[in-house]
């Protein structure tokens, strides 16, 4: 019988396909002007890891090491969010001398952005083009509910679908019941997983999400078990994890944000534990605290701050035990912070506009009059 190649598909799928390329990314790539540098065509690639001014990318012919091209350097000088980030789809230019540069970052579909707490820049992209943000928290020691609320708000703001992963289920005898309580209080509307990654327990739902080709980012504090979860999902020890039983000194085991291809499809982004995540906006909070907003609709005053106003439905719910007081306090704290952050960004934009306007008047003055 003659050899029929269609009956013998390539044993491995191409790296870009595994990284989740689709027609829209290819079209976005085609939209970017391409310059032929001595026959070295530009390539579509996905960023798997970033360093200062450099990043590892995955192209159709495999991994490449790149540095930022001039356009990217210029864009970053104006906007810190323009930094090529893990998960970004980029245009790579191979040069005749063998080195590669990132010439453009394709418009992101989603981005997990944290506000820089106390910093001067406008924020930092933790992961780009993520479909699902898994907020990871351990069932042991006692889970920090305020931290989960904060990370979930960040997740909602990213445009990706949030979910809550509670690790160390093997150490919590009543893990499932605890998870149900936590889910009901802080993660209404989100899927909740209870995992024990060493034992491969509780990973099926996440594996299914990955098998659909999704990119899943793991977000959470240091030591909650993100890298252990990644290793469990990938079935290999790709990332080092904290030593079992080691006294956690707050040192971070994972120091880079890395995108990994899962064997059954999809990608997982592991991130270093975050001590502080500032919130950029209030939209995510509205999602996380939808119960408070629903109650607030019953307050006598539309601008009720749910403090001491008469006819406050939120305070009434706290008094009756329907709404935990902790939750109202957490809502207050995060609202205040998000409002402060918003006003800070507004102030920065005003400053920039002022600088821009001054530069224009200066250049107008410098122009010779006729
Ligand atoms: N018993 C048990 N231990 C776990 C589980 N998940 C993680 N651990 C342990 O918790 C410790 C921290 O796990 P890591 O995966 O390194 O935590 P991480 O979130 O990646 O930490 P950073 O990289 O610092 O952000 C390690 O000693 C793990 O072995 C689990 O499901 N059960
Ligand atoms: Mg880690
Ligand atoms: Zn009120």
Image (cartoon, rainbow, N blue to C red):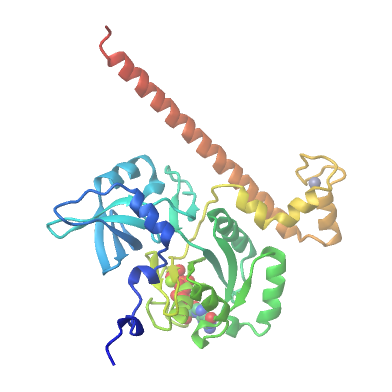
Residue 330 position within the rendered picture, expressed as x and y whole percent measured from the top left: 67, 55
On the question of residue 249 being in view, the answer is no
Q: Nearer the viewer, residue 305 or 370?
A: 370
Q: Nearer the viewer, residue 148 or 113?
A: 113
Residue 50 position within the rendered picture, expressed as x and y whole percent measured from the top left: 33, 60
Most distant residue in the top direction: 370
Most distant residue in the left direction: 97
The structure residue drawn at horizontal position 66% and vertical position 57%, both measured from the top left corner, is: 288
Q: Nearer the viewer, residue 347 or 24?
A: 24
Q: Nearer the viewer, residue 252 or 83?
A: 83
Left or right side of 237 for 193: right
271 up-or-down from 316: above or below = below
The structure residue drawn at horizontal position 31% and vertical position 54%, both measured from the top left corner, is: 91
Q: How many marks?
A: 0
Left or right side of 244 for 343: right
Left or right side of 126 for 301: right
On the question of residue 100 being in view, the answer is yes
Please state the quadrant of the image where ligand 2 appears: bottom left
**Quadrant where the image shows the N terminus:** bottom left
20 up-or-down from 53: above or below = below
Left or right side of 52 for 269: right
Residue 271 position within the rendered picture, expressed as x and y whole percent measured from the top left: 43, 65
Q: Name which quarter of the figure residue 19 lies in.
A: bottom left
């Amino acid at each position: 019988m003659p050899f029929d190649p269609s009956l013998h598909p390539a044993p491995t799928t191409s790296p870009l396909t595994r990284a989740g390329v689709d027609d829209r990314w290819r079209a976005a790539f085609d939209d970017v002007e391409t310059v032929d540098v001595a026959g070295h065509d530009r390539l579509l690639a996905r960023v798997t890891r970033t360093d200062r001014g450099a990043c590892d990318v995955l192209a159709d012919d495999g991994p490449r090491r790149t540095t930022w091209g001039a356009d990217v350097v210029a864009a970053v000088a104006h906007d810190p969010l323009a930094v090529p980030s893990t998960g970004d789809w980029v245009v790579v230019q191979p040069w005749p001398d063998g080195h590669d540069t990132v010439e453009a970052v394709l418009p992101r579909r989603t981005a997990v952005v944290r506000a820089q707490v106390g910093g001067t820049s406008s924020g930092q992209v933790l992961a780009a083009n993520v479909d699902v943000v898994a907020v990871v928290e351990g069932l042991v020691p006692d889970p920090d509910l305020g931290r989960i609320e904060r990370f979930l708000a960040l997740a909602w703001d990213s445009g990706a679908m949030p979910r809550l992963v509670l690790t160390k289920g093997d150490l919590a005898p009543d893990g499932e019941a605890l998870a149900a309580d936590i889910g009901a209080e802080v993660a209404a509307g989100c899927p909740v997983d209870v995992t024990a990654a060493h034992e491969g327990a509780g990973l099926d739902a996440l594996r299914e999400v990955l098998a659909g080709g999704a990119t899943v980012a793991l977000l959470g504090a240091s030591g909650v078990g993100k890298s252990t979860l990644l290793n469990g999902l990938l079935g290999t020890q790709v990332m080092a994890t904290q030593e079992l039983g080691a006294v956690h000194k707050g040192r971070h085991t994972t120091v880079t944000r890395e995108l990994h291809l899962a064997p059954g499809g999809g990608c997982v982004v592991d991130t270093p534990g975050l001590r502080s995540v500032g919130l950029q906006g209030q939209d995510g909070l509205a999602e996380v605290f939808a119960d408070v907003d629903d109650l607030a609709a019953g307050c006598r005053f539309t601008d009720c701050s749910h403090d001491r106003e008469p006819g406050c439905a939120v305070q009434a719910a706290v008094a009756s035990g329907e709404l935990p007081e902790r939750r109202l306090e957490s809502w207050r704290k995060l609202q205040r912070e998000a409002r402060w952050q918003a006003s800070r960004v507004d102030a920065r934009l005003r400053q920039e506009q002022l600088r821009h306007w001054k530069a224009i008047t200066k250049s107008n003055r410098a122009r010779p009059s006729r």
